[in-house]
Image (cartoon, grey):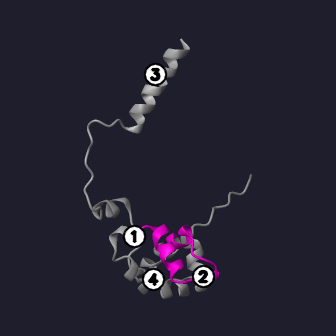
């Protein structure tokens, strides 16, 4: 019977890497300050801003968005701040609320119409 291996996730790496925890503790106050601007809360924008400040990740290289995501996931576990944003939090931070636009087709409706046109052309 084949042995199944579980793919490690961010929590697995963060729980065993003390260098990673030290990096998270070092970045916690900086991230808290950078997150005050609601327009720049995405993991990619936070990583870019840390790279612009000359900060380096736990491996000594520049910070990628996936490394930033791991850092944000580790913050609440170390009781240093909020975790990564979820969709409802991001939606509540929007400058203008979402509005339904009646004249615009959704992507799925446009796909149905395209499929109908292709079927009509083939017959």
Q: Residue at x 25, y 56 (%)?
A: 97
**Is tag 3's residue or tag 1's residue first in the polypeptide sequence?**
1
Q: Please report the bounds of the magenta region as a residue range.
A: 42-69
Q: Within 10 angstroms of label 4, few (less than 14), some, or many (20 or more) residues?
A: few
On the image, the x and y values in percent for residue 49 come to 48, 76
Badge nearest the viewer, 2 or 4: 2
In the image, residue 97 above or below residue 42: above
Which residue is most to the top? Answer: 123
**Horizontally, is 83 left or right of 70 in the view?**
left
Q: CA distance from mark 2 to mark 1?
A: 22 Å
**Is tag 2's residue or tag 3's residue first in the polypeptide sequence?**
2
Residue 64 occupies quadrant: bottom right
**Is tag 4's residue or tag 3's residue first in the polypeptide sequence?**
4
Q: CA distance from mark 1 to mark 4?
A: 23 Å
On the image, the x and y values in percent for residue 2 come to 74, 53
- Which numbered tag is attached to residue 116? 3
Q: What residue would you read off at disc 4?
A: 78
- Which numbered tag is attached to residue 58? 2
Which residue is most to the front? Answer: 52
**Horizontally, is 77 left or right of 102 in the view?**
right
**Is tag 2's residue or tag 4's residue first in the polypeptide sequence?**
2
Q: CA distance from mark 2 to mark 4?
A: 16 Å
Judging from the image, what secondary structure is the residue with disc 1 in? Answer: helix
- Which numbered tag is attached to residue 40? 1
Judging from the image, what secondary structure is the residue with disc 3 in? Answer: helix
Queried whether the magenta region covers residue 113, the answer comes back as no
């Amino acid at each position: 019977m084949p042995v199944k291996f579980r793919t490690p996730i961010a929590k697995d790496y963060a729980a065993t890497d003390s260098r990673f925890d030290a990096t998270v503790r070092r970045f916690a106050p900086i991230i808290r300050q950078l997150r005050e601007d609601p327009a720049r809360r995405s993991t990619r924008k936070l990583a870019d801003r840390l790279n612009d400040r000359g900060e380096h990740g736990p491996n000594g290289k520049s910070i990628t968005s996936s490394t930033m995501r791991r850092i944000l996931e580790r913050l609440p576990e170390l009781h240093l701040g909020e975790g990564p944003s979820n969709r409802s939090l991001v939606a509540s931070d929007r400058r203008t609320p979402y509005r339904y636009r009646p004249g615009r087709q959704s992507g799925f409706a446009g796909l149905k119409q395209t499929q109908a046109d292709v079927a009509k052309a083939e017959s």
